Amino acid sequence: MIVRALVVSLFATTLHAQTSDSLRLYYVGRPVGWETYDFSHDASGARLSADLDYIDRGRRNHQQATMSMAADYTPRHLELARVADTNRTIITRIDASGGRAAVMRNGQTSDVTLPPTAFAIAPYTPVSQHLALLRYWQGHGSPASIAVVPGAPTNRVSIKRQGVDTLAGGGRPTLLTRYAIDGVVWGVEYAWVDAAGRLAMFSSAAGGLSFKAVRAELVPRYPELMNIAARAAMSDLVAISSRTRPIAQGKVALVGATLVDGTGHDAVPNATVIVADGRVVAAGPSASVAVPAGARRVDVTGKTIVPGLWDMHAHLHQLEWAPVYVAAGVTTVRDMGNELAFVTTLRKTIESGRARGPRLFLAGLIDGGGPNAFGAESAVTPDEGRVIVRRYHDLGFEQMKLYSLLAPAVVAAICDEAHRLGMTVTGHIPNSLSLLAAVDSGMDQVAHLPVRGDPRSDSTKVVIEHLAARGVVIDPTASWGEIGGHSTAESVQSFQPVLQHLPPALIQTRVAGWGSANVDTATAHARMGRTLSTIRALHEAGVPIVAGTDEGVPGFSVYREIELYVAAGMSPMEAIRAATAVSAKAMRADKDVGTIEPGKRADLLVLDANPLENISNIRTARLVMQGGQLYESAALWRAAGFTP
């Protein structure tokens, strides 16, 4: 404890240290670029200049930032620019003086009154801004919260000194003070600072996928640092989970609701569902299902019970997604590509019962080689592919997820090895293969919607018939396509009416950036119409469709995906089954979950209104049961920082 206190003291005494460093940048575990920065301080003030440059799947992201601050780190000027080969575009500029700030962000300008404790930071990169934020916070007495710009008009940011982590490998142990920063973006970000006041590591998922920065000389210790980062996130997830308690567990009787059990059978009015020890004991008409002695009776008259929902295309790179999913009634999720240390630790933590989150199935991401590859695992030869498959299998992954740059021979080897080990294969169609060639190489499932052409044409019908004959499962992620492809002339609220429920930082740093300014509303609607026509043709041909979102609006995008399936021509019952029973079967878990039947895991959702009458009633979650534990959905939403 004395040593750890000394680390904090040393950071305070080196608060004004001049720092010049290079940070290695990682995206979903893959090194993608660098950030270099210079941070100086003297009697006249402090200055930060940063240059961040990385490549994400062939797209270069080059940013430059400059900051000037007073001697106590009070902001004076911030400018962040996006740099291309032929131009430099300022995306954020803030000039602060006399308690006011002129803010320009993404072409929008505003004049903001600043409270006494305020800072300027442009989410979420460059990384070194966060070191400046920490120095401001430390120099102003470590307040409980700080107002930051840009915001709406300001956001509240909390910073907590969470303790000291020991980097044990590499000879002499290195002690790193961990800070949790919450509110710059949606979700907690972490910064680790050494005794010299230098940034050692930074962790964020602000862009939707995991983003890490590691100081250059610590790169050889990257695996150990990732384990430290995963443990930090799990500690906060456990804390969030402790804010809610089940309102019923053990032996529970849900009495009086309409039961939609997910089997496809007709709904049962005035039904009773009996749960004990996390399993469904009985489910049927209340007249024939007796409530056993000692059961906690929950009156759900007038409501509707459906199985717990699935998201078959998720990326849980951020701890907040776990409780949000459960709040929405999404009790099972397939993660489609993640950092190994984070996602395996997340699954263990949820399975231990210490944290609230959905049951996780894992698909191991693998891509080809080269600078444009995605994720940490790359295979350029068949043998490399087989080795990676075995590594994922040994970690308990159920599937492999293929990505775009894999060569045909490598795809075949991955599929063969996965099938030999009892795994299945899903993912993107590699650029080197057609859809049918990929399926014939062994892909069991396909992500997104790679069926091209008019579904009424003979050529497209041949493709669809082949998919049906092979039993290929497709997760169309239609809701993700709608979010990204809608015209910015049309508000997200018009098709996803949830903005009133979301944390402000989520709206500002994610939702506000969705859509295209280069497409008009009519064109966007026509494109979505073609997507829905293809989904309809697939469904009518017998191709299994499962509900996946590829993120989107946390929790709510699962509801939208189900709504879009009805818009595509599915019945409400079929759309619900796509997000329950069909998904469970696709993951070979249908004997255990996916429907509400005796002996199955007690995962279910109690709705205020019947989705068979109006599919949008799927949004009316009142109670969520996961593994036999019954929670109030509103309480779970609040614990995750949402407004019910």
Image (tube, rainbow, N blue to C red):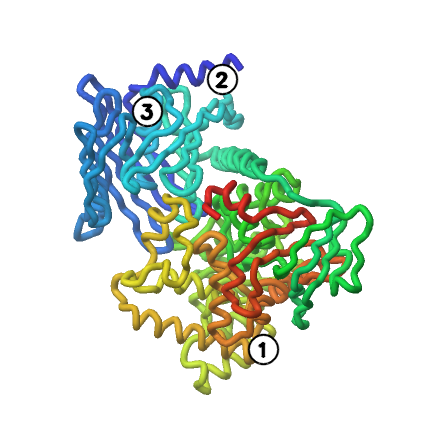
Which residue is located at x 30 percent, y 49 percent? 61
Can you give x and y, in whole percent of width and height, for residue 4 in the image? 49, 17
In x, y percent, where is residue 369?
Answer: 43, 55
Q: Quadrant of residue 281?
A: bottom right
Instruction: Using residue 575 as the reference point, say whether residue 71 is left or right of it.
Output: left
- Is label 2 in a helix, a strand or a loop? helix
**Badges 2 and 3: C-beta atoms under 8 Å apart?**
no
For the residues labelled 2 and 3, the Cα–Cα distance comes to 19 Å
Q: Residue furthest bottom?
A: 458
Residue behind mark 3 = 135
Query: Which residue is rendered at x = 20% and y = 35% of the image?
Result: 101
Amino acid on which the number 3 mark rests in the picture: Arg
Decide which of tag 2 and tag 1 comes sooner along the chain. Answer: 2
**What residue is disc 1 on?**
542
Using the image, determine if residue 617 lies above or below residue 139: below
Q: Residues within 10 Å of mark 1 (few under 14, many from 20)?
A: some
Please name the residue that numbered disc 2 is placed on: 4
Q: Position of residue 212 (x, y in %)?
A: 42, 40
Three-letter code for the amino acid on which mark 2 is drawn:
Arg
The amino acid beneath tag 1 is Gly
Q: How many labels were placed on the picture?
A: 3
Does residue 91 appear to the left or right of 21 in the view shown?
Answer: left
Residue drawn 43% across the image and 44% down it: 205
